[in-house]
Image (tube, rainbow, N blue to C red):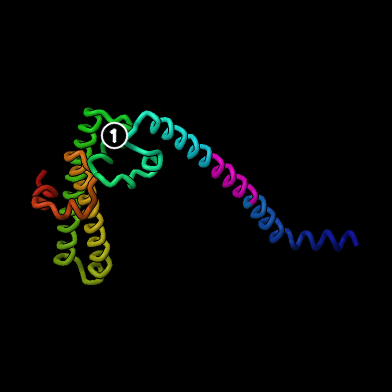
Amino acid sequence: MGLLRGLVRLIAYPVIKPVESARDAAAQIRADLAASKAGRERRREAVAEQLRKHAADRTDVTPEQLLNPSLITNPIRRFAVLADLHKWTAEGLAEQLVAVRRGKRFALASAAMVFCLALATFYFAPIWVVLVLAPCLFTACTLCLVSAFKYGLYQSQLEDRCLHGARDYLSRRDFVQHLMLS
């Protein structure tokens, strides 16, 4: 009987060992996930407490508005509250503005370069390469343009000191000029 059990264990070992390893790994993942959730909850409570203390110093903002700044309807006031909450200085905002402008210019240059590369593939590459590369390159170009739009929106928010949305940015009279030239 002992010989038969040993033989079965020997044959079943390639199946038993991975199952045991997977079970142990799943238990470890569950423990790590629980610890991560507990840590996030502690951090969330600490931030909420800090915001409540900050709200006690301010009479124009409620604690709910500090926890969820989108409840503040005035975009200029929302920017001022966030700047005060995060202790942003004029120098820090100027550095952010320079970095956002650089990012926008880089995204626009990347979009132009990828678009030229896509056009060059149509002219120089065989058709099977065009069928593979062109959609990828046009997708990359679109992603670069979306990134440039995002940086342009951030730049506009920093220049105006106002947290307006994408619709307000799109409805600017000088939208194209602001996006491409500034």
Query: Which of 146 and 74 lies nearest the eye of the viewer?
Result: 74
Image coordinates of residue 144 in percent, x first then y, are 23, 53
First to last magenta residue range: 27-39
Q: Nearer the viewer, residue 79 or 123?
A: 79
Give coordinates of residue 90: x percent, y percent.
22, 29
Name the chief secondary structure element in magenta. Answer: helix
Q: Position of residue 4 (x, y in %)?
A: 86, 63
Magenta includes 28? yes
* Residue 175 vs residue 13, the one in the foreground: 175
- Circle 1 Cα neighbour tier, 10 Å, few/some/many (<14 / 14–19 / ≥20): some
| Residue hosting label 1 | 83
Q: Is residue 34 left or right of residue 168?
A: right
Amino acid at the residue labelled 1: Ala
Location of the N terminus (image quadrant): bottom right
Q: In which quadrant of the rendered view does residue 39 lie?
A: top right
In the displayed structure, 90 sits above or below 36; it is above
Q: Is residue 176 magenta?
A: no
Q: Secondary structure at mark 1?
A: helix
Left or right: 65, with 104 as reference point: right
Which residue sits at x=14%, y=55%? Answer: 171
The residue closer to the viewer here, 139 or 94, is 94
Above or below for 32 versus 140? above
Q: Residue furthest bottom?
A: 127
Check the image and name the residue furthest to the front.
Answer: 59
